Amino acid sequence: MTIADRKTAARRLTDAKRVIVKVGSSLLVDGEKGRLNRHWLESLVADVATFRKRGQDVILVSSGAIALGRRHLNLNAGKLRLEESQAAAAVGQIRLAHAYKELLDVHEITVAQILLTLGDTEQRRRYLNARGTLNTLLSLGSVPVINENDTVATAEIRYGDNDRLAARVAQMVGADCLVLLSDIDGLYTANPHEHPDAEFISRVLEISPAIEAMAGGVSSTMGSGGMQTKIAAAKIAVAAGCHLCIAKGAYQHPLKRIEEGARCTWFVPSSTPLATRKQWIAGTLKPAGAITVDEGAVRALAGGKSLLPAGVTRAVGRFDRGDTVSILGPDGTEVARGICAYSDGDAARIIGRKSIEIEKLLGFRGRDEIVHRDDLVLLKTV
Ligand code: GLU
């Protein structure tokens, strides 16, 4: 690939609406002294500010809490026990958050901290809550900084690496680009430290077993992720329609550098986040319930609108917020399928009513739409 080709490939980053940037511990923290690489972080934050000015949403998934905290507890040498790394994370996270706040303040960007556990991304109700909060923070213009909640995550229920966590976050918020800033510039046919003749791979269209085999056991010196967790992350991201880039971060302005044509590996999805989500909705084998709508609503849906409670005449079945439901026309044929923003009980109370009445009827201010158009797929019969 020439520089010009690499610059073209990097348009995915420049043109992305929503970007997730994962920052590895070895970039953030000086290994010897255990101190924050502040100068480097300033340059990353300046890149983030450029993205924000262009109108892109940015989420940072930042490691470094453990690496940063251990020195303060005199846990200097060797591998830490789980409780020790949890203690180090508690000490390091507050410093990390403070550094991000200070540096983003310079650009008048409001930072928000979110600490997630595995359960928050795997259990539907918590997943929906985390997604809702992230979407709200982004829509209000802030930059969320996410890390795993290491202090409470126990061995069996933790990610342990932020590569996969970042990919789940990308999937959660429908990001179109995820950059893993790492201590290696991308994927090679073999471990380049052991095989100097290993070839660099610039683009992966399909994560085949051969690609997985290339990940071998390349590991990072400080963080928990190696190439294997990056490939696992790529699988999650690509399946969600999100581009993923593995790039070496140990330079000033690491994001700008990618846009200027630095070498990196791109994993390319075959679909967009929205299309992937819609395929997933359409493919639901057994919708949990059915919502019948009137003629006017059928027309509105066909015209690309969301489904409002006013157009619904009946709701049957047991479903929860976030479940897929069938949407039936007045004659009972299924016209669409979508993710319902309300449980069956709440839906029953608001059907046929105006959206402004929702708060009075339910006691909380939920979404105006019972099924939002991004969560809705029209079936061919419409
Ligand atoms: N959550 C860990 C930390 O903040 C890092 C995990 C990783 O290395 O990816 O220190």
Image: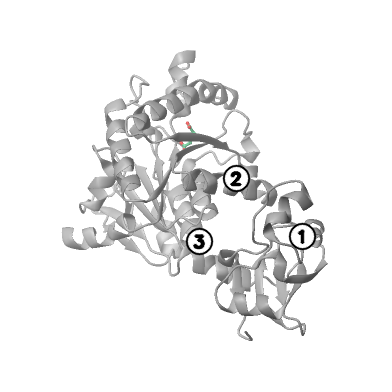
Given residues 221 and 157, the one toward you in this image is: 157
Neighbours of disc 1 within 10 Å: few (<14), some (14-19), many (20+): many
Q: Position of residue 291 (x, y in %)?
A: 75, 71
Neighbours of disc 3 within 10 Å: few (<14), some (14-19), many (20+): many
Secondary structure, mark 3, is loop
Q: Position of residue 181 (x, y in %)?
A: 35, 43
The amino acid pointed to by label 1 is: Ile
Q: Earlier in the sequence, mark 1 or mark 2?
A: 2
Q: In this rendering, would 130 be left or right of 195?
A: right
Q: Colour scheme in the image?
A: one colour
Residue 237 appears in the rendering:
yes
Marks 1 and 3 sit apart, C-alpha to C-alpha, by: 32 Å
Given residues 347 and 246, the one toward you in this image is: 347
Q: Which image quadrant: the C terminus?
A: bottom right
Q: Position of residue 73 (x, y in %)?
A: 49, 14
Q: At x 35% / y 42%, what residue is drawn?
A: 182
Tag shown at residue 350: 1
Disc 3 + disc 2, Cβ < 8 Å: no
Q: Is mark 2 within 8 Å of ligand 1?
A: no
Q: In this rendering, would 40 be left or right of 365?
A: left
The amino acid pointed to by label 3 is: Ala
Q: In the picture shown, does residue 237 fall above or below 142?
A: below
Count of labels shown?
3
